[in-house]
Amino acid sequence: MPISDDIKLGHAERLLAQLRESYLQDLPNHCGEIENLVLSFDRKDPETVFDEIFRHVHSIKGSAGTHGLHLISGICHHFEDHLKTLDGRFEKIDGRFINVCLAYIDCIRTAVSLFEKGGETLPLENELEQLRKRFLKNNLAGLLVSSSNYITMLCQQTMGDLPVKLTTVDDGFAALERLLQQKYDFIITDKELKQLNGVALTLAVRASDSVNRDTNIIMLTSKMSIDFPAGLAPDEVLPKNTGLSHALVDAVGKIFNGK
């Protein structure tokens, strides 16, 4: 007799649960491999070690998202951002850099234990926020979302002398994935984006229950007439004209003064 849809669905759910459990069981081994790599920076070619660490962390992030383990994906996002601060300058690797790497690895291990035991994740989320502040060292964490090379370059140059660590992405879906998992102090988004435009991104973040629901959003646009539902609008809408750099400095300065 034919197999019912309910039976097929139940089988698929059990299979997914088994794959998720297997993934969690394997993660401590991957954490051990990353830890060994981090501790080998002073003994091996740092560029090769860096590439291996980044590959491991990126793989864990992607797999965690597939299994719905968004806390682990978020930790890996933070970890990747920390690794990117080297920007190819491996002479910057010091005890502080390594200690922060090890702290992120410990966060992944803690997350695995919490998921396996079904425990409350809030304490780890608080610990991750403290680690984020330690990584930032009194700087603001900003996310720039733009598909325009010119706007990206302009914003990076404008933020260059400000106490800001700016992460850039070029499409709305990638930005939304980050914003649902990783805390930022402000968001700068172009209205015109690939895949998910700035208006839809703003509405999604404002309507979500994420850590960035109340984060300051600055929208850049060449058309100022944008209607937003009450309570879901960006904090500022800046015209893309010759005064954009000065307007950005003023907008981000207000956010910094408010911290």
Image (cartoon, helix red, strand yellow):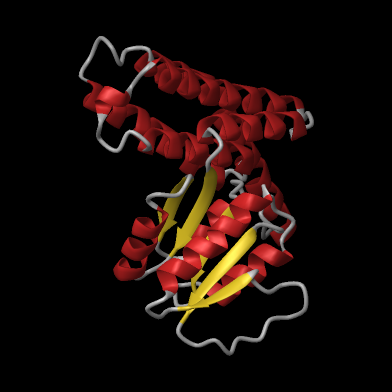
Q: Is residue 161 above or below residue 201?
A: above
Residue at the (50%, 88%) spot, across then down? 223
Q: Is residue 37 above or below residue 166?
A: above
| Residue 124, horizontal then vertical, whole percent | 69, 29
Q: Nearer the viewer, residue 23 or 126?
A: 126
Residue at the (25%, 9%) spot, across then down? 43
Q: Quadrant of residue 120?
A: top right
Left/right placement of residue 116 relative to residue 88 reads: right
Left/right placement of residue 61 relative to residue 6 reads: left
| Residue 64, horizontal then vertical, whole percent | 54, 40
Q: Quadrant of residue 83?
A: top left
User: Is residue 60 shown to the viewer in this render?
Assistant: yes
| Residue 257, horizontal then vertical, whole percent | 63, 51
Q: Residue furthest top?
A: 43
User: Is residue 26 shown to the viewer in this render?
Assistant: no
Residue at the (34%, 64%) spot, across then down? 154
